[in-house]
Amino acid sequence: MYYVGMDVHLKTTSICILDENGRPVKRKTIHGRWDKVLSYCQQIDEPFAVVYEASCGYGYLYDALSTMASRVQVAHPGHLRLIFRSKRKNDRVDAEKLAKLLYLDEVPAVYVPSVDLRQWRALIEHRQSLIAKRVRCKNGIRALLRGQGIQPPKGLWSRLGRRWLEAVPLNGALLGIQRQTLLAELSMLDEQIKQVTAALDRLAASHPGVAVLRTIPGIGPRTAEAMVAYVGDPSRFTRAHQAGAYFGLVPCQDASAAANRLGHITKDGPATVRKLVVEASWQVIRHCPAEKERFERIVQGKKDRRKIALVAVAHRLVRCMVAMLRTGEVWREAA
């Protein structure tokens, strides 16, 4: 059995191969795209296990290497302290250290979702990027009106509001060109978001986990589908508190002896899910009396604690949603 460590980049990949005793038998640097790396791995004449760091495109490599290697592990880049805290760091050294971690079975592995799940996640992120572009476009239109001292009416983005935008007089032909391009971009983004949302609705309708999470008062389809897509296999969380840490909703901690210092939340994991859950927490507080009571208890009547209380509610929601996905139970109102 060989143990292969790879430091993968887009155009250069360093490979180190260890034998069954942990001794290096081959070191190689491949200059070229990933197809050359896969061709080289196919020529390894012994059964082998392989490890590399997670980066953009790690799913493609995982699927390709799984067809030829007996075991494939993807290492978490942020947990590879042996590499990042080293005084001597280069691609060849990193590949050898990865191979040694694989040999010792000490790789901090990440969860690799299926192809369908990765595509679902990518579509969710694509919709979020389209929404961000639309927000920037709307801000550009408002800035244009503000620069002319024009007060827009209510319902600016409705059909009547857009007719008003097209007809409102501006001081200069150049500003008219800017307005037309912004309105054209806004219409294009609206249509693209509509198409992506329709595709996501079809995916969500075919997954029972989305329907289970939507039984929570205030949780909409976008939050539910994001949780289902990023949780993947809920059984990988042995405890509910691990879900809060995975989504970065637990505080940073620096504890020693009797001192225990807690800071801001870690913000690890997928930022999109964290954002959606925190936004949905406002609606859950509004529609769920038990969560509203918990929110008010943490606030303690102080306005500067509202964000802290909101994150606490979001943390609890994440734990509850993972438990619901694991058991298939619907939302039960707490006493």
Image (spheres, rainbow, N blue to C red):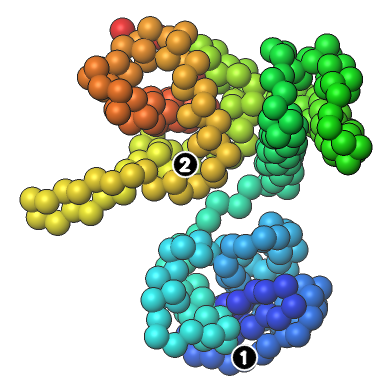
Q: Residue at x 51, y 11 (%)?
A: 217
Pick whichever, 108 or 11, lies toward us: 11
Instruction: Give me the residue at 44% from left, 87% from top.
Output: 88
> Percent position (x, y) of residue 180?
89, 33
Image position, residue 96 (x, y; %): 52, 84
Can residue 118 be spotted in the picture? yes
Which residue in the protein does label 2 denote? 247
In the picture of the structure, the residue carrying the numbered disc 1 is 27
For image coordinates 71% across by 81% down, the residue present is: 12
Q: Nearer the viewer, mark 2 or mark 1?
A: 2
Q: CA distance from mark 2 to mark 1?
A: 38 Å
On the image, the x and y values in percent for residue 288 come to 43, 9
Instruction: Report helix, strand or loop for mark 2.
Output: loop
- Give the residue displayed 80% in from the left and 15% down from the top: 161
Quadrant for residue 1, please give it: bottom right
Give the x, y percent position of residue 169: 86, 24
Horizontal side of residue 319 vs 263, given as left or right:
right
